[in-house]
Image: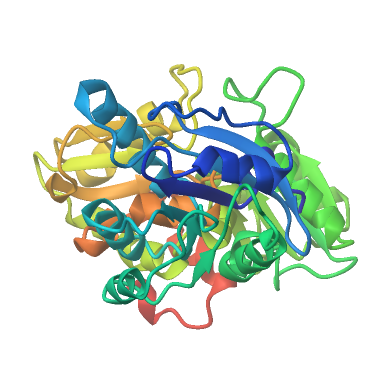
Amino acid sequence: MSKGRDLKPHIAVFGRRNNGKSSFINRLVDQEVAIVSDQPGTTTDPVKKSIEIFGIGPAIVIDTAGIDDVGELGGKRVRKTLDILSIIDCAILVIANNQFGEFEIDLINKFNDLDIPFFIVHNKSDQEALSEETQNLISEYTDARIIEYSNLQPANLPDIIQLLKNTIPSSAYQSVTLFESIISEKEIALLVTPIDNEAPEGRLILPQVMAIRDMLDHHAISIVLQLEELDFFLKNSGIRPKLVVTDSQIFNQVDKIVPSDIPLTGFSILFARLKGDFETYLKGTPHLKNLKDGDKVLIFESCSHHVNCDDIGRFKIPNWLRKFTGKSLEFEVVSSFQQTKHDMGEYAIVIQCGGCMFTRKQLLNRMKQAVDQGIPVTNYGMAIAYMHGIFHRAVAIFIEQNEILT
């Protein structure tokens, strides 16, 4: 499966003002992409740049504002810097002049909370070497690797690139596929792709395109059709597909047409398996039946888009859920990495879209707060299948036993 721009591993460089973060990034990417100045606070909003890492491939390096920035504007810069934590796969903490204190300790604690792998670069080592006292202090808080470095004498830059390669989790860049273990070479899958108001003019939506590409990568055969042609095809083609995949919005109609002995699932559920914590979704989905009057339901979208009356997250899922539960529910829809209106503990359940625009790490980080607080989480496709009474069928192909579904 080819990677889109946002699916590359994300690496962020953190540190205090004037520790040489921007110069370090310029050396790392071998381009003048970050503004370098002796004036503290030059870097404001996080700046992203593509880099090619041998053995990994394309990645995104992010330059951030100083974690010790001050004042009202500085506080906003720091908040934007910390917002980056939810989207990165690896971090580099740049220190200099043996300065290590509350700013670095607080950041390391955040790395640990979000399971972000990192290492430490002691910059300006040509001016002042890392002291034993600083090494011992750092070791009280982390066992992360520390490497000496100088932007003026970057002889060990290859060592840092190798360390970066060793630190980035392989799951951030290794090819993982939508149809892994469920479709093989020359097997046939029907992809039922409705063309509705949410489909872009003349094109398919991204999950459908990615599914077709993944089928091609498996040297499997994908037959793409709309709901209106599905019954005709199954009755007249003489072809028995290995699998049928549909847009979750028409699960109910497709379920009635496709014979029960042919596996059926949804594009959104394929992405739940690829990007999310699949078992947590499985366990969380049945909690939809436990919702009560007044419960808050949080719906996460992975991208911003034009909203219309057919919008699945803002209209269809809320309407289906009210009908399914018979309860008066309160819904909040949050796009991309925007903040929620309420504390996470106030929500009764979280429903996440397929996440085709997110990396796996970004999606897991986004859901972590809910999972840590024991709030049930589910996914668009699973939730829709559950509300229409076909949950077991929609996930059966991915699991070996059904005890988890009760």
Give above or below for 330 relative to 378: above
Q: Residue 255: where, in percent of width, then height?
A: 56, 52
- Between 19 and 166, the residue placed more toward the observer is 19
Q: Residue 8: where, in percent of width, then height?
A: 65, 48
Extreme front residue here?
127
- Between 381 and 210, the residue placed more toward the observer is 210
**Quadrant in the rendering for residue 32:** top right
Which residue is depicted at the point 53% across and 76% down? 399
Which residue is depicted at the point 31% across and 35% down? 78
Q: Residue 381: where, in percent of width, then height?
A: 48, 49
Count how many numbered circles sit on residues in the image: 0
- Between 162 and 293, the residue placed more toward the observer is 162
Res 80 visible: yes
**Quadrant in the rendering for residue 294:** top left
Question: Dividing the image into 4 quarters, which one contains the N terminus?
Answer: bottom right
Q: Residue 312: where, in percent of width, then height?
A: 45, 32
**Image-based side of 165 in relation to 76, left or right:** right
Which residue is depicted at the point 32% across and 61% down? 108
Give above or below for 52 relative to 317: below
Which residue is depicted at the point 51% across and 52% down? 124
Question: Dividing the image into 4 quarters, which one contains the C terminus?
Answer: bottom left
Give above or below for 43 relative to 100: above
- Between 160 and 368, the residue placed more toward the observer is 160
**Image-based side of 109 in relation to 182, left or right:** left
